[in-house]
Image: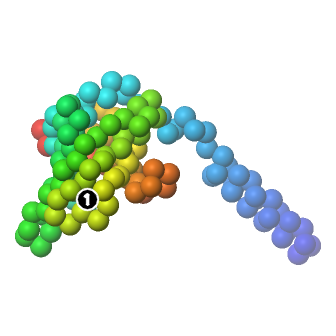
Amino acid sequence: MKNKNLLKLIVIFVIGFTMLTSCSSDDDSITNTNNSSLFDKWWYDSNNVTADIYFHADGQYEQKIILLGNEITGTGNWTWENESSGIMKIDNLGGNGQVVSSVWFKFSDILNNTVTIQQSTNGTDYSIEVFYQDTDN
């Protein structure tokens, strides 16, 4: 009887694990294929943890965050590494407190006033999702 219950538990675990890890890749695609809603406005992390970011339509990038009363800024250049997958690379990062010269952003759920972004320092391993809202709202 114990072995039967153990077997049931193992089967339930395997099925649950398979269901959690077998998500299709279509959830990685961006919602809005018109990425122009990203440009020429400030975006802020709705949880107020990460830097405010600005993507200029001409390829320039800015970021700023206030830590302990000090504004820390950075600049760089952005290019689409894979626009259809929502992957943007920021190069030539410079400014106060910059520890890397390049980062990658993975965009999803791009709407007019909100966007979801994951960040990577190597282009393959991305952070958890951060929800941004534009400063016009």
Q: Position of residue 28 (x, y in %)?
A: 49, 39
Q: Classify residue 101 as left or right of residue 64.
A: right
Q: Is residue 65 visible?
A: no
- The reply to whether residue 75 is visible in this rendering is yes
Q: Quadrant of residue 88?
A: top left
Residue sitting at x 33%, y 24%: 34
What colouring method underlies this structural image? rainbow
Q: Locate the N terminus by quadrant.
A: bottom right
Residue displayed at 41% across by 54% down: 120
> Circle 1 is placed at which residue position?
50
Q: Nearer the viewer, residue 104 or 115?
A: 104
Q: Would residue 93 be found to the left or right of residue 31 on screen?
A: left
| In-image side of 112 versus 20 (left or right) | left
- Left or right side of 40 for 11: right
Of 76 and 131, which appears nearest the observer? 76
Q: Residue 19 placed where, x, y %? A: 67, 49
Tell me the residue at 61%/44% (across/down): 23
Q: Residue at x 22, y 47 (%)?
A: 76
Within 10 Å of disc 1 (Cα), the crowding (few <14, some 14-19, many 20+) is some
**Which residue is outermost to the bottom?**
2
On screen, residue 131 above or below 28: below
Q: Secondary structure at mark 1?
A: loop
Residue 79 falls in which quadrant of the image? top left
Give the farthest residue toward the top.
34
Q: Foreground residue, 70 or 136?
A: 70
Q: Quadrant of the C terminus?
A: top left
Q: Quadrant of residue 73?
A: bottom left
Residue 12 in percent (x, y) is at 76, 59
Badge 1 amino acid: Thr
Question: From the viewer's perspective, is residue 41 above or below residue 50?
Answer: above
| Coordinates of residue 118 in the picture (x, y in percent) | 39, 50
